[in-house]
């Protein structure tokens, strides 16, 4: 379980910096359209998009750092942190499922299914194994 918490926590913490860089339209377009094809039209921030992006970055950074730190905590606490992470990943996957109803997403959106489910599955396995 400590391996899951450390590696997935580091992944989340480092990913937060990519989301922070996505504050700029050019970076967001490069990540969302050109690199991952999650959106199929040129991307630019509208409305409160930057605010939500910063919120997501801060949540990812906090969650990642807590998970990395939790890797050294007692097993009972690790289990709680990992179980909460599994809940977050299931929730993220459900957001992708319901988000597919919008026509403006590109074919890259389908790569999010194995990503979210893989993270949730790894976490559930770690919680079930207990170590």
Image (spheres, grey):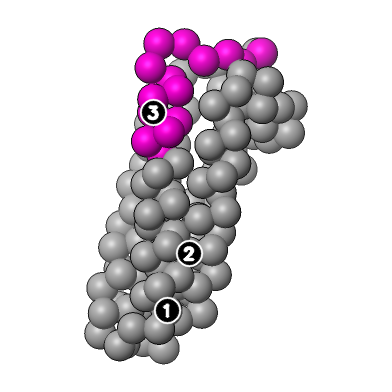
Q: Position of residue 97 (x, y in %)?
A: 42, 36
3 or 2: tag closer to the N-terminus: 2
Which residue is rendered at x = 38% and y = 57% of the image? 63
Whether tag 2 and tag 1 are in contact, CB under 8 A, the answer is: yes
Q: Is residue 89 left or right of residue 33?
A: left
Mark 2 or 1, nearer chain start: 2
Which residue is identified by label 3? 52
Q: Quadrant of residue 108?
A: top right
User: Magenta span covers which residues?
Assistant: 42-56
**Which residue occupies the foreground of this view, 70 or 103?**
70
Based on the displayed image, in which of its 4 quarters is residue 86 positioned? bottom left
Mark 2 lies on residue? 9
Residue at the spot 35% in from the left edge and 70% down from the top edge:
82
Q: How far apart are marks 3 and 2 (CA)?
A: 21 Å
Query: Who is closer to the viewer here, 107 or 6?
Result: 6
Residue 109 screen position, x and y as percent: 58, 34
Residue at the (43%, 33%) spot, across then down? 54
């Amino acid at each position: 379980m400590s391996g899951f918490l450390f590696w997935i926590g580091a992944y989340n913490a480092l990913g937060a910096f990519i989301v922070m860089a996505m504050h700029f339209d050019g970076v967001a377009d490069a990540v969302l359209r050109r690199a991952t094809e999650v959106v199929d039209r040129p991307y630019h921030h509208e409305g409160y998009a930057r605010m939500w992006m910063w919120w997501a970055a801060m949540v990812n950074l906090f969650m990642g750092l807590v998970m990395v730190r939790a890797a050294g905590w007692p097993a009972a606490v690790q289990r709680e942190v990992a179980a909460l992470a599994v809940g977050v990943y299931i929730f993220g996957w459900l957001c992708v499922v319901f988000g597919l109803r919008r026509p403006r997403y590109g074919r890259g959106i389908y790569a999010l299914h194995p990503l979210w489910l893989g993270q949730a599955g790894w976490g559930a396995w770690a919680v079930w194994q207990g170590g």
